[in-house]
């Protein structure tokens, strides 16, 4: 007889990363439960239904729904994205449901640079992850955090580093500071393996590619056929002042990624303390990683 497939519950399964994780788990042969909010529209649920996964609704006003959604799972993966109401409140309710259901392992929605090494109070979204980590580590469940640096897709425009109009690559501090980037697809594939891993460590750090701004400029130059050069925006101290000014004039209340939040993330990357080390990229040797030149080339097609 064939062994029973591993059972994984994924919360936030209708989101971009969550759906990718579900797809990766299905490709690995796992039995997946996709946890969605009550009343989630059919259009958002359709990609999950097409994958043949179990759909479980859980949310406010439904006592016991989180425990029921997690029941029987070998691991719960959180792919929540949001602010305090989501990363702290909803994720805590998910954690409590997993504990009551007797789930042995939990992967939180960290997916970031090494926030444990950043300065508390300096990055709102990382502070939320730090706060949830305290709750997770106090819970009677084994936790594994997947840290992937920044999503490589940000280089396509949302992270204002590659300035095509000027043929420059912007940076603060040092152009030789190495930065960790991983595509969403590669992050999802690795997370799926971690969810199926019977004995993963507390922390898993991966980077599809690590490079300096000088190396990024060389990569863009090779792909575009035009010379790109590093452009220093200023010191990290100046970037801090820019963040404060931006928060004053454009507070972005309620936004998950206002402009100043992206600036905080870049500052922490260029600071260097949150660089991912040691890397666990080779933990599952058959996984293939997308480097920055391949990513940029694909974006030109």
Image (cartoon, rainbow, N blue to C red):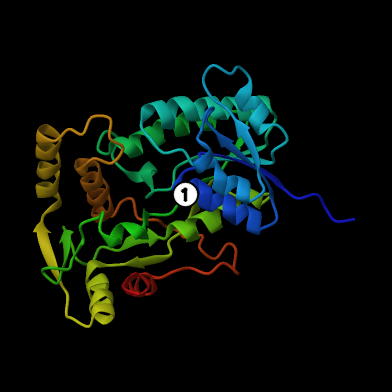
Is residue 257 shown above or below 226? above
User: In the rendering, at what x and y percent does residue 290 appear?
Assistant: 44, 69
Residue 68: quadrant of the picture: top right
User: In the rendering, at what x and y percent does residue 227 appear?
Assistant: 16, 80
Mark 1 highlights which residue? 17
User: In the rendering, at what x and y percent does residue 219 appear?
Assistant: 28, 76
User: In the rendering, at what x and y percent does residue 267 appear?
Assistant: 22, 50
Residue 267 placement, left or right of 19: left
Q: How many marks?
A: 1
Q: Nearer the viewer, residue 179 or 12?
A: 12
Q: Quadrant of the C terminus?
A: bottom left
Q: Residue at x 55, y 41 (%)?
A: 45
Q: Quadrant of the N terminus?
A: bottom right
Q: Residue furthest right?
A: 1
Tell me if residue 78 can be seen. no
Q: Nearer the viewer, residue 284 or 18?
A: 18
Residue 296: quadrant of the picture: bottom left
Tell me if residue 187 can be seen. yes
Helix, strand or loop at label 1? It is: helix
Residue 291 placement, left or right of 196: left
Q: Residue at x 15, y 51 (%)?
A: 236
Is residue 41 shown above or below 115? above
Q: Residue at x 70, y 56 (%)?
A: 29
Number of residues whose C-alpha sits closer than 10 Å to that of mark 1, classed few (under 14), some (14–19) or many (20 or more): some
Residue 163: quadrant of the picture: bottom left
Q: Residue at x 51, y 54 (%)?
A: 188
């Amino acid at each position: 007889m064939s062994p029973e497939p591993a059972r994984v519950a994924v919360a936030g399964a209708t989101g971009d990363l969550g759906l990718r994780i579900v797809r990766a788990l299905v490709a690995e042969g796992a039995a997946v439960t996709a946890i969605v909010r009550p009343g989630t529209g059919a259009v958002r649920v359709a990609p999950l239904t097409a994958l043949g996964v179990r759909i479980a609704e859980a949310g406010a006003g439904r006592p016991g729904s989180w425990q029921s959604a997690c029941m029987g799972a070998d691991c719960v993966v959180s792919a929540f994205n949001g602010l305090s109401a989501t990363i702290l409140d909803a994720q805590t309710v998910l954690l409590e449901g997993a504990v009551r259901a007797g789930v042995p392992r939990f992967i939180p929605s960290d997916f970031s640079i090494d926030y444990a090494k950043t300065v508390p109070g300096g990055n709102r979204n990382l502070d939320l992850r730090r706060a949830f980590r305290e709750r997770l580590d106090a819970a009677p469940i084994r936790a594994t955090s997947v840290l992937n640096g920044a999503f490589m897709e940000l280089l396509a425009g949302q992270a204002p580093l590659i300035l095509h109009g000027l043929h420059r690559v912007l940076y603060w501090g040092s152009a030789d500071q190495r930065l960790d980037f991983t595509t969403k697809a590669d992050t999802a594939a690795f997370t799926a393996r971690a969810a199926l891993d019977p004995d993963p460590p507390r922390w898993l750090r991966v980077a599809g590619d690590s490079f300096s701004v000088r190396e990024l400029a060389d990569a863009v130059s090779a792909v575009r056929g035009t010379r790109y050069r590093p452009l220093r925006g200023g010191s990290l101290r100046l970037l801090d002042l820019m963040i404060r000014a931006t928060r004053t004039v454009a507070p972005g209340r309620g936004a998950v990624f206002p402009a100043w939040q992206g600036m905080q993330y870049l500052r922490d990357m260029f600071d260097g303390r949150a660089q991912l080390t040691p890397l666990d990229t080779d933990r599952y040797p058959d996984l293939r990683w997308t480097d920055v030149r391949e990513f940029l080339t694909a974006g030109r097609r």
